[in-house]
């Protein structure tokens, strides 16, 4: 992940306008497999579950069985950008719509101490810069559903370039969509954490990152390390308290 560049980000764009999102997401699953995130959830050492949202009912869905890559893919299905994922006769989308920081799930899985990471603490106002992504840099051209008419396939490239770029006086399509979702997730996160606070809450400062800045992994990792080091006294205190209460 540390060597992930902008061309690699562009390669994730498998555009299918007929599947409920701009990005179909199968390349994301393939990439997860390349990182070793594969096999069934039940076969993992530590207990694991992913959270997603039922598109039809709005219910919070906990994915605790089946292929782990598919579960992760369902959990990151950002509305309007990633296509929803079909799972057990449901269409699933991003967990951020219902439970961005799933403290409740961690406790349900049996965690004695919950150390939560809130990536939404500086979301509002975060900008997406379409100029950071050059779709033409992808080694493979954006794919379009085979069922789409030829005129639509011919139009996808120019349309995608336009939605990725902001005008001189207007925000881009992605800026409007991403920041709208950021505002919503920020409010949901605050409400959920107030009702079910973790033992330790980590809030890395990621305000300068956009949701496509995967090529900046080293910077994100450095900030995450600094955040954990600053919270080390709280983490140690939480561990001592848990041992004392056992």
Image: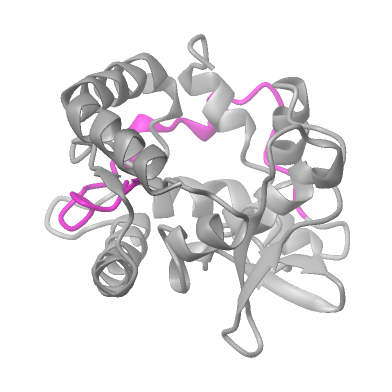
* Residue 164 spot, x, y in % from top left: 40, 47
- Residue at (73, 30) in percent of width and height: 37
- Residue at (77, 50) in percent of width and height: 70
Looking at the image, is 154 positioned above or below residue 151? above
* Residue 159 spot, x, y in % from top left: 51, 55
Image quadrant of residue 10? top right
| Most common secondary structure along the magenta stretch | loop
Left or right of residue 131: residue 171: left
**Can residue 234 be seen from the camera position used here?**
yes
Image quadrant of residue 217? top left
Looking at the image, is 173 positioned above or below residue 240? below
Q: Is residue 158 magenta?
A: no
Left or right of residue 162: residue 166: left
Left or right of residue 164: residue 50: right
- Residue at (68, 36) in percent of width and height: 46
Q: Is residue 135 magenta?
A: yes
* Residue 230 spot, x, y in % from top left: 16, 25
Residue stretch rendered in magenta on the structure:
116-144
**Can residue 24 be seen from the camera position used here?**
no
């Amino acid at each position: 992940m540390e060597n992930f560049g902008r061309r690699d980000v562009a390669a994730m764009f498998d555009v299918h306008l007929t599947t409920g999102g701009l990005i179909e997401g199968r390349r994301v699953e393939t990439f997860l497999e390349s990182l070793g995130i594969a096999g069934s959830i039940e076969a993992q050492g530590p207990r694991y579950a992913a959270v997603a949202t039922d598109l039809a009912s709005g219910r919070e869905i906990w994915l605790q069985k089946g292929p782990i890559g598919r579960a992760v893919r369902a959990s990151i299905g950002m509305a309007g950008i990633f296509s929803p994922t079909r799972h057990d006769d449901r269409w699933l989308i991003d967990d951020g719509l219902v439970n961005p920081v799933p403290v409740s799930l961690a406790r349900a899985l049996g965690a004695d101490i919950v150390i939560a990471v809130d990536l939404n603490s500086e979301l509002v106002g975060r900008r997406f810069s379409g100029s950071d992504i050059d779709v033409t840099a992808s080694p493979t051209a954006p794919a379009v559903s085979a069922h789409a008419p030829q005129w639509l396939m011919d139009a996808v490239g120019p349309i995608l370039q336009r939605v990725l770029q902001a005008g001189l006086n207007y925000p881009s399509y992605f800026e409007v969509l991403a920041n709208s979702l950021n505002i919503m997730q920020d409010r949901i996160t605050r409400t959920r954490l107030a009702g079910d606070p973790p033992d330790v809450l980590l809030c890395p400062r990621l305000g300068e990152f956009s949701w496509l800045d995967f090529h900046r992994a080293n910077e994100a990792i450095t900030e995450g390390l600094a955040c954990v080091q600053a919270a080390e006294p709280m983490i140690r205190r939480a561990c001592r308290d848990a041992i004392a209460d056992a």
